[in-house]
Amino acid sequence: MSNPMGYNAIMNLNHISVTGPFIHENLGIFLLHAQDSFDGNRFMPLDDALEQKCVIVHETGTVGQLEVENLSELLDLYIQAGDIVKGGRQDRTLGVDFVLPAKSGRVPVPSFCVESGRWHRRAAEEAGSFSTSKHYLASRKLRVATKLNKSQGEVWDKVAETQKDLSTSMKKSLHASESPTSYQLSMEDADLQKRKETYRVTLAGILEEKPDAVGYVFVINGTINTADVYGSGTLFRKLWNKLLDAAVLEAIAESHREDKKETKPVTGDAIRQWFADAERADISDRQEVPPRVRVETRRSKKSVLFDTCDHALEDAILHRNLMAN
């Protein structure tokens, strides 16, 4: 059964307003505003669920697949493609958006390795499960490699590129001695954390007094990069810290490429046109993700758009992810 009102609330551009940009250095953020399509209080994101011990992410011994178990009695677990889990035999990123209902049992989910040099327990971590999920893939190239191309080899290549870009921007190696190929450990570098904080001081609070914000678009070095829009402002706020962290990390990685020439500023109208162009593209792929979501992909010359629909909410769109080519 379709959900026209839920669909239109974040699909129809006439229902979305744009504010911003909010700028720090080479990163600009626009907020997207619309009415909610569903109650986001029913969902818990992966990082919160791990902290509250409401979920177990199981190591399977297979690089391309993990198993996730929602232990909550009441809440649905929302996992977003690009969520990174730390631990197991090697750090992974989860390859697709999906939802697990309360008391789900163990459910398989596709994954990709973001640490090519380890296949054993690390320090005091558990080899059979994953302890935290503090980061999201902070590179459009990495997100394309996982969500669109689904290529483990490409993921390893883009991890190495991202580490190199961050090291160049930070003017130091971000390869951790205990595991040089670990994307996760590179993100934990102390100097990088301090650099991130300079962005967060300016940008972390932009959702305050904006209860109708349901998503954002970020611009790096004057160019539109990525948008994430949700059918619930509550769900968006639950994910905001990780989303902002990823945008900041990508901005830092790209800062050494910043073009000092004047460019035409990105406007709200340009963002609305970007979405409109993406929506005109035909659906190129439909993927059912058990137990209850469908992901639809649209590709155009300028972008790739992923819509994640929840069958339990009459196919309302949970998440729209739009990335520029």
Image: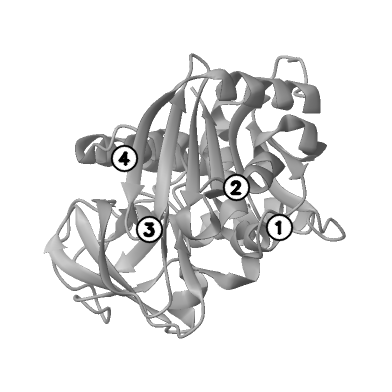
Image point (29%, 51%), residue name = 114
| 3D distance between C-alphas at marks 4 and 2 | 42 Å
Q: CA distance from mark 3 to mark 2?
A: 38 Å
Q: Real-space Cα distance between discs 1 and 3?
A: 28 Å
Give amino acid for label 3: Gln
93 relative position to 171: left or right: left
Residue 97 is situated, as x and y percent measured from the top left of the image, at 42, 52
Note whether 61 is above or below 148 in the view shown: below
Q: Nearer the viewer, mark 2 or mark 1?
A: 2
* Residue for badge 1: 233
Between disc 1 and disc 3, the foreground one is: 1
Instruction: State the residue lying farthest toward the right.
Output: 209
- Check if mark 4's residue and mark 2's residue have beta carbons within 8 Å: no
Say which amino acid is labelled 1. Answer: Gly
Residue 250 or 281: which is nearer the viewer?
281
Label for residue 160? 4
One can see residue 174 in this view: yes
Q: Which mark is residue 3?
A: 2
Decide: few, some or many residues near mark 3? Use Cα within 10 Å; few <14, some 14-19, many ≥20. many
Dot 1: element: helix
Q: Earlier in the sequence, mark 4 or mark 2?
A: 2
N-term mark: 4 or 1: 4
Mark sitting earlier along the chain (2/1): 2
**Disc ID at residue 252:** none
Q: CA distance from mark 4 to mark 1?
A: 34 Å
Q: Which residue is mark 3?
A: 184
Q: Decide: few, some or many residues near mark 4? Use Cα within 10 Å; few <14, some 14-19, many ≥20.
A: many
Callout 1: 10 Å neighbours few (<14), some, many (20+)?
many
Give the alpha-carbon distance from disc 3 to disc 4, as whole Å: 12 Å
